[in-house]
Amino acid sequence: MIRTGKKFSKPEMSRVINGDRVLSGEPEKEEKKRLDMILVGIYKSYNRSTLQKFIEKGFVKVDGEVVLKSNAKFPEGVYIEMKIPEELKNADLIPKTVYEDENVIVFDKPAGLLSEFKGEYSPEMTLAHYGRIVHRLDRDTSGVIIVAKNEETQSKLRRQFQERKTKKTYYAVVSGRPKLDAARIDLPMMRDLKRPTTFRVDPNGKDAETFYRVLKTDGKHSLVELKPTTGRTHQLRVHMKYLGHPILGDPVYGEEPANRLYLHAGALEITIPEGQRKVFEVPMPKEFAKKIEDAEVDGSEEE
């Protein structure tokens, strides 16, 4: 259970009361602030969207009364109490910070950590608790991901993904050995209406392009480098499944169970605020290489 109570007040008013500062002129109209904005200033470990969900769920009281509207306004001096019914799940899945400045944080996301929860409130730790979501990695995918610290940065970074101005490199262990050591996969995708949470290759779908290169193989499994130029949901998983070489441990598109999904975001190239072009890299998990017994292929990418 998380239960905290704090008083919303302004330090400058204390100075007036203590005689350190004199108010001049007509008395000012009492200033009021939105409840969600008050909470942002008090509970800095949560972003505004999450706090709004807490309010809607009835987890927040003001002077002892439950308030359900985020835009409700209150003056300074009210007592704020937030009571969450249970501890956040997956709190032990802590992303490692790779880079941080005043605008962004780059993480090495562990497999199992959700990027962002959709719909009703869920008491589960997600990347959204650390900042504003810019792009997503599937829950079971590990690797490099960037979040924004403010709305302006979030908008700028998202635009780069939408305009395909970012470059992403992934690593995966797939079943079998692809026929070609390197190739371009240009296969449009769409949602599978028979299984709405999944996607499939379809000529009527949206364009989806992936370049792959086999790094090494033992015949049974292959370690491949994947470079998508588009960002369709489940793109890499669907493309490799279509080629007949699904990613190891994929519970949806795969055939061979494993202790995890063997898909890792290894590098991200992006322009951060102030115009700096950066390449952020995180190491491949050790278990990826261990799945390949003997390195036989060192292919080169073809376009």
Image (cartoon, rainbow, N blue to C red):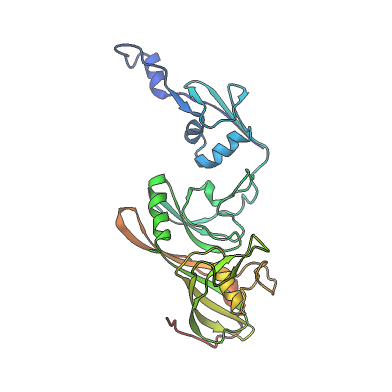
Q: Is residue 3 left or right of residue 203?
A: right
Q: Nearer the viewer, residue 256 or 235?
A: 235
Give the x, y percent position of residue 106: 45, 56
Q: Residue sitting at 51 percent across and 30 percent down? A: 71
Q: In this view, does 76 lie to the left or right of 65?
A: left
Q: Is residue 11 left or right of residue 289?
A: left
User: In this rendering, does residue 103 appear at all?
Assistant: no
Give the x, y percent position of residue 69: 56, 30
In the image as oriented, which residue stretches furthest toward the top? Answer: 26
Q: Residue sitting at 56 percent across and 53 percent down? A: 94
Q: Which of 187 and 4 is in front in this view?
A: 187
Give the x, y percent position of residue 118: 59, 49
Total labels: the figure holds 0
Vertical position of residue 78 compared to residue 225: above or below: above
Q: Quadrant of the C terminus?
A: bottom left
User: In this rendering, does residue 293 appear at all?
Assistant: yes
Vertical position of residue 257 compared to residue 197: above or below: below
Q: Quadrant of the N terminus?
A: top right
Give the x, y percent position of residue 214: 52, 82
Q: Residue sitting at 64 percent across and 62 percent down? A: 193
Q: Which of 233 and 201 is in front in this view?
A: 201
